[in-house]
Image (cartoon, rainbow, N blue to C red):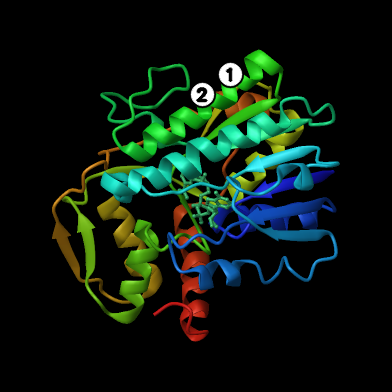
C-alpha cells in the first residue's frame, strides 16, 4: 500500500509512519513542523523515518501545499495533522485551530473527493467532542457537546469527513482517540510534564484535585487501530479508541512515582477552562469492526515513556 500520513513528525503520526514502513508499505509523510511545541522534538521524531527508502518527507502546510503533487498513487490517507491541545484553544489562537483543524481537513477532502483509487481516509478524531458527560462510558451515538474550542474544531472536521462520505463517497472513517500516551508524547500533555518534572525533582503541577479520570490509551494500540481501520473500517463510521486504563489522575501519579523511583512533589492549581472531569470510552464498535483490543497496561506504557524521556534528556532535547 502507498499511504499519506499527515502530521508525520508529530507524536502519533511518527509512530504510525514507522509501523507502516515496518509492515512493508510506502509512506509519503507531510508535516509543517509547526511551533505549537519545540520543532526540535519533531525533527527527532523523524530520525528513523528519513533514511528509510520507502519514506518520502514533504515539509509543507496542508493549507498551502499543492495537494495534487502529494496524492498520486495514494491508497490510504491517515490524517493526523492538527493543532492539538484544549487549554490553548481559547482567545486569539482559536484562529490557528480553525486553520489547522477545519480548513486543512476541508482542503484535503476537496482534493480527494474524486480520487478513484482511494481506499480509506482515516481521520484522527478526539474524545474532546463529547464534552462534559453525566454518565460513562461515552458512546459514538450520543450527542456531542464539546467543552473547549479545540473540541469544536475536531467535531467540525469529523463532520466534514462524514458529509464528504455521504455526498461524494469519500471512504472516511473517524477514530476518536482518548488521551494517548507513550514515547514522544507532546510536551503539553500531563504525563509528559509529570515525568519531566519528576525526573528533575521539580514539583508537579496538576490542575484541580487530581480526582479527574481519563481513559489512557497507549500509542501503539492507537497505531494498530489505524492499520485495522485502513483494512476493515467501515466508511462513514466513527469509532471510539480508549485504552481501557481508566484511572483517577492521582492514582496514575502513584504508578508514576513507583516507576520513576522517587517521591513526587505535587502542587495543585486551579482547574483549567476547557478541561473535563472524566472520560471513558465504549469501545464495542471498534472491537467488533476493527478487532480493537488495547493490550498495554498503564504501568508498562509509562515505563516505556519514562525511558524515552531519559533518552531525550541525555540528548539535551528535553530538560
Ligand atoms: N495525543 C492525544 O492524546 C490525542 C487525543 C485525541 C486526538 N488526537 C489527535 O491526534 C492527532 C495527532 O495528535 P498528536 O498528539 O500526535 O499531535 P502532534 O502535535 O504531536 O502532531 C500533529 C502534527 O501535525 C503537524 N501539523 C499541524 N498542522 C499542520 C498543517 N496545517 N500542515 C502540516 N502539518 C501540520 C504538526 O507540525 C505536528 O507535527 C491530532 O489530530 C490530534 O487532534 C490526539
Compared across the picture, whether 38 is left or right of 105 comes to: left
Q: Which residue is depicted at the point 58% across and 21% down?
A: 162
- Quick one: which residue is furthest to the top in this view? 167
Q: Where on the picture, by quarter, is residue 256?
A: bottom left
Question: Of residues 227 and 119, which is closer to you in this image?
Answer: 119
Res. 243 visible in picture: no
Q: Which residue is depicted at the point 32% across and 80% down?
A: 200
- Give the x, y percent position of residue 164: 63, 21
Quadrant where the image shows the C terminus: bottom left
> Are the residues tagged 2 and 1 within 8 Å (C-beta)?
yes
Q: Which residue is depicted at the point 77% across and 25% down?
A: 114
Q: Where on the picture, by quarter, is residue 53?
A: bottom right
* Ligand 1 is within 8 Å of the C-beta of the residue at disc 2: no
Compared across the picture, whether 307 is left or right of 128 comes to: right
Q: Where on the picture, by quarter, is residue 104?
A: top right
Q: Is residue 42 above or below residue 115?
A: below
Q: CA distance from mark 2 to mark 1?
A: 6 Å
- Give the x, y percent position of residue 129: 40, 31
Can you identify the residue that label 1 sits on? 163
Can you identify the residue that label 2 sits on? 159
Amino acid at each position: 500500500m502507498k499511504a499519506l500520513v499527515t502530521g508525520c513528525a508529530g507524536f502519533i503520526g511518527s509512530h504510525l509512519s514507522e509501523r507502516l514502513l515496518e509492515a512493508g508499505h510506502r509512506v509519503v509523510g507531510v508535516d509543517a513542523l509547526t511551533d505549537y511545541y519545540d520543532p526540535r522534538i519533531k525533527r527527532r521524531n523523524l530520525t528513523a523515518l528519513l533514511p528509510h527508502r520507502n519514506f518520502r518527507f514533504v515539509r509543507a502546510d496542508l493549507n498551502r501545499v499543492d495537494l495534487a503533487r502529494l496524492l498520486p498513487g495514494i491508497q490510504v490517507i491517515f490524517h493526523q495533522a492538527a493543532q492539538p491541545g484544549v487549554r490553548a484553544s481559547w482567545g486569539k489562537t482559536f484562529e490557528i485551530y480553525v486553520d489547522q483543524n477545519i480548513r486543512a481537513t476541508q482542503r484535503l477532502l476537496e482534493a480527494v473527493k474524486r480520487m478513484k483509487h482511494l481506499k480509506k481516509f482515516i481521520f484522527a478524531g478526539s474524545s474532546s467532542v463529547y464534552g462534559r458527560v453525566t454518565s460513562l462510558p461515552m458512546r459514538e451515538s450520543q450527542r456531542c457537546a464539546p467543552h473547549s474550542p479545540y473540541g469544536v474544531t475536531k467535531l467540525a472536521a469529523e463532520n466534514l469527513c462524514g458529509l464528504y462520505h455521504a455526498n461524494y463517497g469519500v471512504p472516511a472513517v473517524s477514530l476518536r482517540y482518548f488521551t494517548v500516551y507513550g514515547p514522544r508524547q507532546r510536551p503539553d500533555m500531563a504525563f509528559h510534564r509529570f515525568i519531566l518534572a519528576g525526573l528533575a525533582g521539580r514539583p508537579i503541577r496538576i490542575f484541580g484535585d487530581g480526582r479527574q479520570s481519563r481513559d489512557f490509551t497507549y500509542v501503539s494500540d492507537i497505531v494498530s487501530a489505524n492499520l485495522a481501520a485502513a483494512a476493515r473500517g467501515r466508511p462513514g463510521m466513527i469509532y471510539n479508541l480508549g485504552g481501557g486504563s481508566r484511572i483517577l489522575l492521582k492514582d496514575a501519579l502513584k504508578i508514576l512515582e513507583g516507576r520513576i523511583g522517587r517521591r513526587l512533589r505535587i502542587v495543585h492549581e486551579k482547574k483549567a477552562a476547557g478541561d473535563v472531569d472524566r472520560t471513558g470510552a465504549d469501545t464495542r464498535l471498534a472491537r467488533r469492526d476493527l478487532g480493537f483490543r488495547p493490550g498495554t497496561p498503564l504501568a508498562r506504557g509509562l515505563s516505556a515513556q519514562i525511558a524515552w524521556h531519559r533518552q531525550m534528556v541525555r540528548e539535551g532535547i528535553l530538560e
